[in-house]
Amino acid sequence: MTDAKLKKIIMVDDDITNLNVARNALISKYDIFTVPSGKKLFQLLEKLIPDLILLDIEMPEMDGYEVIARLKNSKIFADIPVMFLTAKIDPESEIAGLSMGAIDYITKPFSSPLLLKRIEVHLLVEFQKKELIHYNNNLEYIIAEKTKTVYEMQSVLLKTVAELVDCRDNITGGHIERTQRYLKLLIDTLLNSNVYTEEIKTWDIDLLIMSSQLHDVGKISIKDEILMKPDKLSYEELEEIKKHAVVGVNIIKKIEEKTKENAFLRYAETLAGTHHEWWDGSGYPKGLKGKEIPLLGRLMAIVDVYDALTNERPYKKAFSHEASVEIIKEGMGTQFDPQLEEIFLKAEKEFKSILIGDS
């Protein structure tokens, strides 16, 4: 009974004495199979694939060169390493054998210790080559898995920070998840409608959606008595609230300065700094007008207002979906990009489904 862990070697030689000598030299370390011809080799290869073939050149019917040529032209056998073990000692024969794909060329009579060592080295090289091929074949998967892990860690961290902000603002009930889903819905509807397509195709949508969690991070600097005030805000308190857009941008910029992985932070900076700008220029913090406002900010403005309208806040009750849609429609051309009205209305049933599903 052979040891399944031993490397398998096939020795091909028409001389029985040579087969026995090679077998005796190798049997202590390898699982040896001996065949007297190329024809017998290919019959054996139908039953097992060896780790190495030791091949004589001078054989009747099919010489060693014909055998290696057939091996290398076969999709099944081409990768089996072949070492010539032959009495042909001329340089031309050695060059021919190596040129045909042999990994080594050993002449008879051979030294058993030297043969063992050369086989050991070649099998080690073949093992390392297979490991490298396996690693390269799996490298894309490995990178994808590591990227996924980093992405998930970033997402959890961002979500935790965003939820801390929302808790201070008395906002509960899945605000973060809803606004992300609303934003993704608007972007998908834009693409399906062939509106702003060229710009959207330059975005990394997954990073963008993840970064949207930080659009209100600046509220972390606003006093609780203002954020949670149940009555109408005074002019001074409203001005304090407005500062959260600039504070949010500054917070994100500080994070950007300390990390190289900042693509998602650039999206977050744009969202935080522009989602309160109005189409007619009366928004804040910069009073941007029309397409001076980045498309990201114009989309986030609709998403943020819809979620604010349809959910209870310390200062108001929740509006119905239908009432919220009408309010947003009325704001098209003043607060919102009028080109987005048709897009929003196309998606409003899905907005309602998300709202109802999370309520």
Image (cartoon, rainbow, N blue to C red):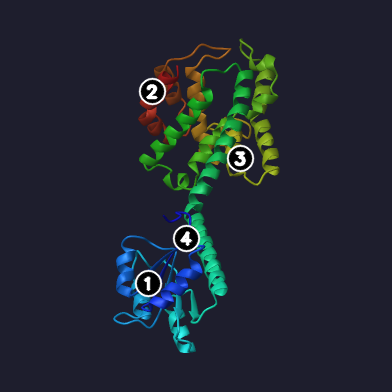
Are there few (<14), some (14-19), or many (20+) residues within 10 Å of tag 1?
some
Query: Which is in the foreground here, disc 4 or disc 2?
Result: 4
The numbered mark at residue 334 is none
The vertical placement of 203 against 222, above or below, is below
Q: Position of residue 301 (x, y in %)?
A: 52, 30
Instruction: Please name which of the two marks, 4 or 3, marks the residue nearer to the observer.
Output: 4
Q: Is residue 148 above or below residue 104?
A: above
Q: Quadrant of residue 316?
A: top right
- The mark that comes first in sequence, 1 or 4, is 4
Q: CA distance from mark 1 to mark 3?
A: 53 Å
Whichever of labels 1 and 3 marks the residue nearer the N terminus, that label is 1
**Closer to us: 288 or 151:** 151
Looking at the picture, tell me which residue is in the foreground, 166 or 279: 166
Judging by the rendered image, the residue that carries numbered circle 3 is 265
Q: Secondary structure at mark 2?
A: helix
Q: Amino acid at mark 4?
A: Lys
Q: Nearer the viewer, mark 2 or mark 1?
A: 1
Question: Alpha-carbon distance for marks 4 and 2?
Answer: 62 Å
Task: Give the residue pinned by disc 2.
Answer: 353
Mark 4 vs 3, N-terminal side: 4
Return the mark for residue 7. Answer: 4
Q: Earlier in the sequence, mark 3 or mark 2?
A: 3
Residue position for label 1: 72
Q: Gap between marks 4 and 3, in whole Å? A: 54 Å
Dot 4 alpha-carbon crowd within 10 angstroms: few under 14, some 14 to 19, many 20 or more: some
Please name the residue shown 51% across and 61% down the image.
127
Give SS at disc 4.
loop
**Circle 4/circle 3 CB separation < 8 Å:** no
Q: CA distance from mark 2 to mark 1?
A: 61 Å
